Image (cartoon, rainbow, N blue to C red):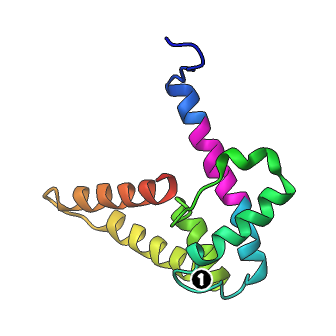
Amino acid sequence: RPAGVSHFGPADFALRRLAGRIFLCKASWPMFSSHPLFGSGWGTFPLYFLDLQARFLAAHPAQVVFWTNAESLHNDPLQLLLESGILGFAAFVWLLAAYATAITSTQCPDLSCLARQTGFERMTEVGLFC
């Protein structure tokens, strides 16, 4: 390996990604505290994030390594909370719970129910972590 080149393994990469996601959440949280009930509006995260990030980095300069021009928060439930507020988030959770109840209570002799359940699980997994 050439001098000055460091090697990061998969665990290091995963920890840096996690730290980056935590940074995104911390930097964008004031968006919720400014508009807790109704949120800041659909699709406003990219409009507010650079300013919020600048304020956060001014207070925490050691975190400048995580600077990004993020188009999304990479956490759908949290982004939904920021953009639609408590009321929009509660409506989403209610719809999600109603759908989960419907697909788990349906008796299907074929594989269509399994496909719906797997799709639901994948949707929630991707929304939370990607």
Describe residue 62's horizontal placement relative to residue 46 as left or right.
right
Q: Is residue 90 visible?
A: no
In this rendering, is residue 83 above or below 14?
below
Q: Quadrant of residue 110?
A: bottom left
7 part of magenta stretch:
no
Specify the farthest residue to the front: 3
> Magenta residues, as a range?
16-26
Describe residue 127's horizontal placement relative to residue 65 as left or right.
left
Q: Position of residue 103 (x, y in %)?
A: 33, 67
Q: Quadrant of residue 69?
A: bottom right
Instruction: Using the image as rendered, state which of residue 43 and residue 93 is in the foreground.
Output: 43
Q: Position of residue 53 (x, y in %)?
A: 71, 63
Please report the residue visible at 44 percent of the width from the left and 53 percent of the height from the top.
Answer: 125
Magenta span dominant secondary structure: helix
Please report the residue visible at 51 percent of the width from the left and 78 percent of the height from the top.
Answer: 92
Instruction: Using the image as rendered, state which of residue 120 and residue 8 is in the foreground.
Output: 8
How many C-alpha atoms fall within 10 Å of the one at disc 1: few (<14), some, or many (≥20)? many
In this rendering, is residue 42 above or below 104?
below
Look at label 1 and name its amino acid. Ser
Please report the residue visible at 55 percent of the width from the left and 26 percent of the height from the top.
Answer: 11
Provide the secondary structure element on which disc 1 rests: helix
Specify the farthest residue to the left: 110
Specify the farthest residue to the right: 59
Q: Is residue 24 visible?
A: yes
Count of numbered badges drawn on the protein: 1
Q: Position of residue 36 (x, y in %)?
A: 73, 81
Q: Position of residue 42 (x, y in %)?
A: 53, 84
17 part of magenta stretch:
yes
**Residue located beneath label 1 in the image:** 84
Please report the residue visible at 54 percent of the width from the left and 60 percent of the height from the top.
Answer: 75
Q: Quadrant of residue 51?
A: bottom right
